[in-house]
C-alpha cells in the first residue's frame, strides 16, 4: 500500500508531504488508502519518530477519520488490538473513536494502562464505559470508578465480568443500586465472590425465585451446624490453595461435617472455588455428587466442558455461573479455559434437557465406568 502511494521509509523524513497528500488526494488514491498507509507507517516507524512527526501523523489520522468508512477503522483497530508493539498514542487515538472502533482495543489491547481506562470512564460515553467494564482482569481502582455509574448497562457489564476484582465497598454500592435496578439483581446475587451478608440483605427486595436462591446458597446456618462453619473458617484460613494428593485430613473431616449437617450445597462450592481452595472444591463436589474423589478429578478436569456441565447440573449449580466454575477451576489447575462455540452448545443442551437426577445418573455412570 505504501509503495502504491509513493510512500516509502524515506518519506518518513518528509512529514509535510504526507499531510499534503492526506488533505489533497492524488493519483487516484482514496482517503481510505491514505488513512491505512499513514496508520501502517505510524505502526511500523512509530518508535523512530520525533514528537513533531508523531503529532503530525496523529493530526492526519484525526482529519481523515470522518471520511474513512467505519469498517476500515474497525479492521485497523482489530489488528492493533493483537499487536503488543503498536505505538501507544496510536492506540489512544483509536480508542477515542466511536465505540465500534474502540471496543476491540478496550477489550483486548495490552497497551492500555489502568490510567487510560480510568480516563475513558471519566470522559467517554456509555458505550466506552461498558467496554471498560468488560475488559478482562480489571482491578479495584477501575471497578470502584465503574460502580459510581448510574447506567444499568455499565453496571451489568461489570457484574457479568467474572474476572473483575470488586471491593467489598463497591459490592455494598452495587447491592444498594440493585434496589432500583432490578436487572442487576440476579447476576449480582449469583456472583461467587459476593459477600454472603450482602446477598442476604438483598432478600428484602428481590423476587421470590431469587430470594430462594440466596437462601439456599448464602443463608447463615442454624446453631446445630455452627461448629461445622467454624471449621470452615479455620480450614479456609489455614489450608493453602491447590489440590493435594491425598487431601488434608482437616479438609476431609470438614466436608464430612458439612454433609452430615446438610450444609454441603452449591453455594459452598462456589465460595471455596472463588477463594482458590481447589482441594476443598474437589472434595466437596465429589461428595455432593457421590463420586470417588480420584474419579471425579479425572473426569472433571480431563474430559472436557460437557462433563463439567453435567456435574454442575447434578450439583445444582445454575447455568448462569457455569462459565465461572469452568474458568476458575481450569485456571487453578493451569489448564486452558476457553470454550468453543460447540462446547457452549453442548453445555446449553445439558442444562436445558437434563433434570438434576438425570444429570446425576449420567455423571456417576460416566465417572465410575
Image (spheres, rainbow, N blue to C red):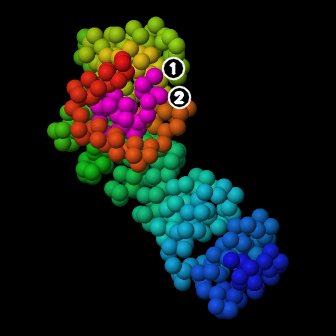
Name the residue tied to disc 2: 333
The residue that appears at 42% across and 18% down in the rendered structure is 295
Q: Image quadrant of residue 200? A: top left
The residue that appears at 37% across and 21% down in the rendered structure is 367
Q: Position of residue 26 (x, y in %)?
A: 67, 92
The residue that appears at 74% across and 79% down in the rendered structure is 3
- Dot 1, how many residues are within 10 Å of its Cα: few (below 14), some (14-19), or many (20+)? some
- The quadrant of the picture occupied by the C terminus is top left
Q: Position of residue 261 (x, y in %)?
A: 26, 12
* Picture layout, residue 176 above or below residue 10: above
- Dot 2, how many residues are within 10 Å of its Cα: few (below 14), some (14-19), or many (20+)? few
Q: With 294 as the anchor, is 53 left or right in this view?
A: right
- The quadrant of the picture occupied by the N terminus is bottom right
Q: Identify the disc placed on residue 307.
A: none
Residue 359 visible? The answer is yes
For the record, the magenta segment spans 298-324
View extreme (front): residue: 369
Residue 63 visible? The answer is no
Q: Position of residue 209 (x, y in %)?
A: 18, 38
Q: Image quadrant of residue 361? A: top left
Q: With 192 as the anchor, is 76 left or right in this view?
A: right
Q: With 328 as the anchor, is 218 left or right in this view?
A: left
Task: Count the labels in the image.
Answer: 2
Q: Are marks 1 and 2 in contact (CB under 8 Å)?
A: yes
SS at circle 1: loop
Q: Earlier in the sequence, mark 1 or mark 2?
A: 1
SS at circle 2: loop
- Prevalent SS, magenta region: helix
Name the residue tied to disc 1: 243
Amino acid at each position: 500500500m505504501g509503495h502504491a502511494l509513493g510512500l516509502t521509509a524515506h518519506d518518513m523524513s518528509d512529514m509535510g508531504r504526507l499531510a499534503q497528500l492526506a488533505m489533497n488526494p492524488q493519483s487516484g488514491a482514496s482517503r481510505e488508502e491514505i488513512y491505512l498507509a499513514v496508520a501502517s507507517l505510524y505502526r511500523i516507524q512509530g518508535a523512530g519518530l520525533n514528537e513533531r512527526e508523531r503529532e503530525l501523523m496523529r493530526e492526519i489520522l484525526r482529519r481523515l477519520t470522518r471520511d474513512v468508512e467505519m469498517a476500515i477503522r474497525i479492521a485497523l483497530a482489530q489488528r492493533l488490538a493483537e499487536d503488543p508493539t503498536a505505538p501507544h498514542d496510536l492506540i489512544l487515538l483509536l480508542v477515542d473513536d466511536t465505540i465500534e472502533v474502540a471496543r476491540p482495543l478496550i477489550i483486548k489491547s495490552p497497551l492500555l494502562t489502568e490510567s487510560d481506562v480510568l480516563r475513558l470512564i471519566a470522559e467517554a460515553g456509555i458505550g466506552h464505559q461498558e467496554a471498560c467494564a468488560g475488559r478482562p482482569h480489571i482491578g479495584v481502582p477501575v471497578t470502584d470508578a465503574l460502580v459510581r455509574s448510574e447506567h444499568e448497562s455499565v453496571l451489568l457489564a461489570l457484574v457479568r465480568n467474572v474476572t473483575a476484582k470488586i471491593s467489598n465497598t463497591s459490592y455494598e454500592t452495587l447491592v444498594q443500586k440493585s434496589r432500583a435496578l432490578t436487572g442487576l439483581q440476579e447476576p449480582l446475587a449469583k456472583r461467587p465472590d459476593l459477600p454472603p451478608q450482602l446477598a442476604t440483605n438483598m432478600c428484602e427486595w428481590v423476587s421470590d425465585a431469587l430470594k430462594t436462591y440466596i437462601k439456599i446458597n448464602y443463608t447463615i446456618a442454624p446453631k446445630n451446624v455452627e461448629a461445622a462453619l467454624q471449621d470452615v473458617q479455620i480450614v479456609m484460613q489455614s489450608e493453602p490453595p491447590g489440590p493435594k494428593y491425598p487431601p488434608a485430613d482437616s479438609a476431609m473431616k470438614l466436608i464430612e461435617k458439612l454433609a452430615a449437617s446438610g450444609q454441603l450445597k452449591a453455594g459452598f462450592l462456589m465460595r471455596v472455588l472463588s477463594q482458590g481452595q481447589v482441594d476443598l472444591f474437589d472434595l466437596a463436589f465429589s461428595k455432593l455428587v457421590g463420586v470417588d474423589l480420584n474419579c471425579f478429578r479425572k473426569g472433571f478436569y480431563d474430559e472436557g466442558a460437557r462433563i463439567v456441565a453435567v456435574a454442575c447440573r447434578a450439583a445444582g449449580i445454575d447455568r448462569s455461573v457455569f462459565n465461572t466454575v469452568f474458568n476458575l477451576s481450569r485456571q487453578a489447575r493451569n489448564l486452558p479455559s476457553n470454550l468453543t462455540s460447540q462446547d457452549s452448545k453442548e453445555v446449553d443442551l445439558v442444562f436445558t434437557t437434563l433434570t438434576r437426577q438425570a444429570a446425576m445418573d449420567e455423571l456417576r455412570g460416566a465417572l465410575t465406568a
